Image (tube, helix red, strand yellow):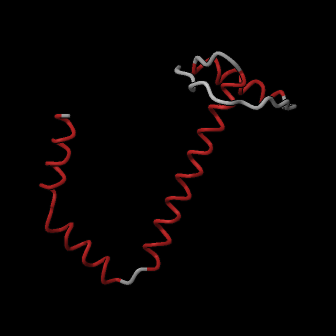
Amino acid sequence: MATVPAMRRVKRSFTLTPESVAFLNKTRQQRGVPSDSETLDLLLRELIQESKHRELNAAYTAYYDTISEDPLTEESEWAGMAGASGLLETEQDEVQL
């Protein structure tokens, strides 16, 4: 497991439940992380990333919920014109990379 590049860290002290400590230890061992603090940092970064992903999805949903049917119809028509062949070409290009 690659560790995060050296960055400024803030020393903190936490009291955890035995279940949380067991989860932290299990995760550290499974992922090959050298310390509990790095494991906790990794889990928090993943949680932050998931939160940002949910926010982005919510923004997309809000956008598409507020636009009129005209742009959606136009997008559907363009997608229909591109058809499956456009998707297939894109996938083949990705495989060749």
Residue 23, percent from left and from top: 71, 27
Q: Is residue 89 left or right of residue 32?
A: left
Whether 24 is drawn above or below 93: the answer is above
Using the image as rendered, state which of residue 5 and residue 13 is in the foreground: 5
Total numbered badges shown on the rendered structure: 0
Which residue extends farthest front?
8
Residue 29, percent from left and from top: 63, 17
Which residue extends farthest right?
15
Q: Residue at point 85% right, 30% down?
A: 13
Within the image, what quadrant is residue 82 found in?
bottom left
Whether 63 is drawn above or below 41: the answer is below
Q: Residue at point 60% right, 51% down?
A: 51
Whether 1 is drawn above or below 70: the answer is above
Residue 49, percent from left and from top: 56, 45
Within the image, what quadrant is residue 83 found in?
bottom left
Using the image as rendered, state which of residue 7 and residue 45 is in the foreground: 7
Q: Quadrant of the C terminus?
A: top left
Q: Residue at point 76% right, 32% down?
A: 10
Whether 18 is drawn above or below 78: the answer is above
Q: Residue at point 85% right, 32% down?
A: 14
Residue 20, percent from left and from top: 77, 31
